[in-house]
C-alpha cells in the first residue's frame, strides 16, 4: 500500500518560474491538504480539500493554487516562485471530514527558490 | 482562533530518563488534540490523539499524554527514553469550528544521550 506519494522529492527553481508539486493517495480519502514546514515555525496549512471539486484556503495560501479533479490527486501549483517559498512541502490525507481522524503524510518535497 | 504553544524548541534527556514535552492550547470550545512525531527526512506520523473521551491517552512507542482542561495543557510523557525516540515532536489542535484546519505547534526536537 503506497499511502501518500509526493513528487518530486527535490526541486530547484529560479525566481519567477512556475511548477507543480504532485500528490496522490490510494486510500480513497476524502480530505487532502498541503502544508509547508519551515524551521521554528512547525507546519502551516496552505490549502485543503474535502472532496473532488471542493477546495479552501488554509493559513498561508498566497502564491499557491490547488485543484481537486479526482479523489486521488491534489496538486499544488506555484504560479511565480519567490525565495520566500523555499521550504519543505508535505501533502497529507485523512478519511472523512470529521476532524478526529489521523492525517497520513507523504515524505515531503524539498523546494529551493533561487 | 485556536493555536498551540510548545514550550522548549529543544529538549535533551539521558537514555532511561523521563521524557516530558509540553504543549498548551488555546481554544474556546473543547478541542481535538494530537501529537505527531517526525523522524529525519520523513513525514509526520500520529503518536496519539485526544477526542473528548478519556483524559489520559496512550499512544504508540510507550508515549502518553494527559488532557487538562483547567490548565489548557496536553503534555506528552514517556517514563523511560530510548535512543530511538530522538525525533521532532509536534502538538496540534483542531476544533469543532474548524474540523478541516489542523493547526500545528512549532515543534520540539528531542535528543537522547547515552
Image (cartoon, helix red, strand yellow):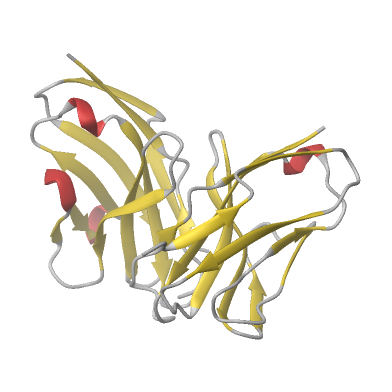
Residue at 67% x, 65% y: name it.
A75
Residue displayed at 27% across by 37% down: B21
Identify which residue is drawn at 42% across, 45% down.
Answer: B5
Q: Quadrant of residue B17?
A: top left
Of the 4 image quadrants, the one containing the C terminus of chain A is top right
Q: Position of residue A56 (x, y in %)?
A: 65, 75
Q: Is residue B53 among what the camera can see? A: yes
- Residue in front for this viewpoint, A84 or A10: A10
Which residue appears farthest toward the top when viewing the image?
B114
Q: Is residue A61 left or right of residue B91?
A: right
- Give the residue drawn at x 47%, y 68%: A93
Q: Is residue A88 above or below residue B11?
A: below
Name the residue nearer the viewer: B12 or B39: B39
The answer to whether residue B21 is left or right of residue A112 is left
Quadrant containing the N terminus of chain A is bottom left
A35 or B24: nearer the viewer: A35
Residue A25 at what x, y percent from top left?
A: 49, 68
Amino acid at each position: 500500500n503506497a499511502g501518500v506519494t509526493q513528487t518530486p522529492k527535490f526541486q530547484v527553481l529560479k525566481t519567477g518560474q512556475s511548477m507543480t508539486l504532485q500528490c496522490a493517495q490510494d486510500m480513497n480519502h476524502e480530505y487532502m491538504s498541503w502544508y509547508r514546514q519551515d524551521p521554528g515555525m512547525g507546519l502551516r496549512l496552505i490549502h485543503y480539500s474535502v472532496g473532488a471539486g471542493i477546495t479552501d484556503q488554509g493559513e498561508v495560501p498566497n502564491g499557491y493554487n490547488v485543484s481537486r479533479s479526482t479523489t486521488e490527486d491534489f496538486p499544488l501549483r506555484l504560479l511565480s516562485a519567490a525565495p520566500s517559498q523555499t521550504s519543505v512541502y508535505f501533502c497529507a490525507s485523512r478519511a472523512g471530514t470529521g476532524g478526529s481522524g489521523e492525517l497520513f503524510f507523504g515524505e515531503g518535497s524539498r523546494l529551493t527558490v533561487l | 482562533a485556536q493555536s498551540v504553544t510548545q514550550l522548549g524548541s529543544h529538549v535533551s534527556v539521558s537514555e532511561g530518563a523521563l521524557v516530558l514535552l509540553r504543549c498548551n492550547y488555546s481554544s474556546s470550545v473543547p478541542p481535538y488534540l494530537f501529537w505527531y512525531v517526525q523522524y529525519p527526512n520523513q513525514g509526520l506520523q500520529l503518536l496519539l490523539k485526544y477526542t473528548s473521551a478519556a483524559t489520559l491517552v496512550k499512544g504508540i512507542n510507550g508515549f502518553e499524554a494527559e488532557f487538562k482542561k483547567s490548565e489548557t495543557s496536553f503534555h506528552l510523557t514517556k517514563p523511560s527514553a530510548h535512543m530511538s525516540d530522538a525525533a521532532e515532536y509536534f502538538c496540534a489542535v483542531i476544533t469543532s469550528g474548524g474540523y478541516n484546519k489542523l493547526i500545528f505547534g512549532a515543534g520540539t526536537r528531542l535528543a537522547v544521550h547515552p
